[in-house]
Amino acid sequence: MNQTPYDRVKLARDSQRPTGMDYIRRIFHGFLEFHGDRRYADDPAIVGGIAWLGNTPVTVIAIEKGHTPKERVERNFGAPNPEGYRKALRLMKQAEKFGRPVICFADTSGAYCGIGAEERGQGQAIAENLTEMSTLCVPIVSILIGEGGSGGALALAVADRVWMPENAVYSVISPEGCASILWKDAAKADLAAASLKLTAEDAKRLGVIEKILPEEDLGEPSYYERIRALLSEEIVRLTHDPDLLQKRYDRFRRIGRIASDRVV
Amino acid sequence: MPLLNFLQPKNDLEEGGRISAPVLSDAGEPEQNCPNCHKDIPISRLRENLLVCSCGYHFRLHARQRITMIADESSFCELFSEIHSCNPLDFPGYREKLDAAAEASRENEAVICGTATVGGQRCCVFAMESAFMMGSMGSAVGEKITSLFEYAVKQRLPVIGFTVSGGARMQEGLLSLMQMAKTSAAVKRHSDVGLLYIAVLTDPTTGGVTASFAMEADIILAEPGATVGFAGKRVIEQTTKQTLPKEFQSAEFVLEHGFLDAISPRKDQKKLLAEILKLHNGGLQ
């Protein structure tokens, strides 16, 4: 517990940390992967499909970073292109049609900053996920398993419940990016990491997530077992909630701290 | 005088181009250098022309100038002006930045919201302020935009919004990021009850604002030459190790790739917005 926020960032980025595919394989069974956004391409940085959570069919979507250097290159280091977000949305819409809950695993340093990504509307793709997820008529649970990199992670996290393992981080900008913009010095990333309040504890305190998942058995069968049990329980609860969408709206509506001059 | 015909402007963009500088500049009058054509333009001449250079370059406008430009005279009624930023994370230097921004922009936040009539039709309006921390979105901007869309739903009004933003405000960390989801959900509710939202993207509209309410309008317009994109140009150059062409992320580039409905020069905007409202029977009482 003596880790600094920047130590957490490094842990969250560790290539040996479980990735999206590890979670899918170990929590669900019978995963069928479905590809493509039906518009342009299939983005290998986002994996999606249908699987069984116990006896319940669910739609599962995960950002995949890969472990080995070769896998990482193939997965574009977990930096999705617009077609990745559009594939995710297509699968969510399909889940809505067939009444399947959606479970997302987000892990990215951010949406890809590339020429093609801009040409194909990275901003528009993320924006569309934000609007559509806000009214998707099935339960959505998102787990930010490693790096929660800004809009690129949020595009899979407009959910009824958002959880984070204790060493995952969630931030509006990378600490290095923040330090280089504000202090013209990427070496001040540790100060930026502390200032940005990006740890799971911070996120929970700010009302951005509901649950912190302990990591003492990270990657062990018991770890996935526990998450499976939590997911199963939560999905049942959310499925029976008649005010699901109103609560999802309120969940985000109340986030923020403002000053007001209004005299009451 | 056919011999002097060459002095006549050939088109809109050239209007005044060849003759304006020598004729209209008074000795001693302050001038502004145009970053596009590099001419010095007398400020009074720029003002008359809605801060558009004769070469077509659109200078940045303040939020209130935008509203004055499109709203019918004295029809604007400001809403939510009491909402402004605090320093929720005790982020180093943020309080000072907010004070400096308030001083520079003479506004208390990076967006102005309210109602107005445009061509006689009532609507909600917001305009972002580039002089306030480059229009970045923190809790207060998110709250004001969300409140405006909720108000518009209650009053059954269309929304016209002018965006200019460097993106989410990093000094409020996750709270800023969440404003993207919060505003998007409010835009969606407004849309789902059949109301019209027109966005006018102005220079620059980037980051978390592009990836939320700027790109969620029914009709998305942009000013000529405005930078519109998600990632910053420098970040893309660093990531891809490529030099980007000048027109990359210009409004014209974004239009060509299918993400804008039209590019609208400033002088045409009021008429165009009024016409679009009329086509949707927007806010006609």
Image: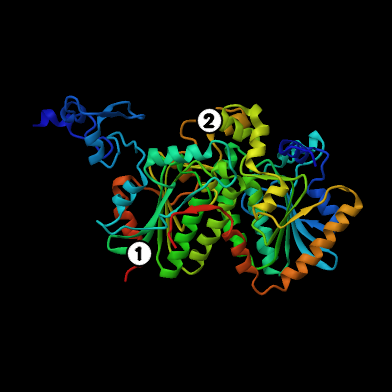
**Horizontal and vertical percent for residue B97?**
48, 37
Q: Residue at x 43, y 58 (%)?
A: A262
**Mark 2 belongs to which subunit?**
B
Dot 1: within a 10 Å radius of its alpha carbon, few (fewer than 14), some, or many (20 or more) residues?
few
Q: Amino acid at mark 1?
A: Leu
Q: Is residue B195 visible?
A: no
Residue A27 appears left or right of B69: right
Q: Amino acid at mark 2?
A: Leu
Question: Are labels 2 and 1 on one chain?
Answer: yes
User: In the rendered view of the protein, which quadrant contains the C terminus of chain A?
Assistant: bottom left
Q: Residue furthest left?
A: B1
* Marks 2 and 1, how far apart at CA: 39 Å
Mark 2 secondary-structure assignment: loop
Viewer-proximal residue among B52 and B14: B52
Mark 1 secondary-structure assignment: helix
Q: Which residue is mark 1?
A: B279
User: In the rendered view of the protein, which quadrant contains the N terminus of chain A?
Assistant: top right
Q: Residue furthest right?
A: A221
The disc, 2 or 1, on the residue closer to the chain's N-terminal end is 2
Residue B128 appears left or right of A72: left
Viewer-proximal residue among A99 and A189: A189
**Horizontal and vertical percent for residue A114?**
60, 37
Q: Which residue is mark 2?
A: B244
Dot 2: within a 10 Å radius of its alpha carbon, few (fewer than 14), some, or many (20 or more) residues?
some
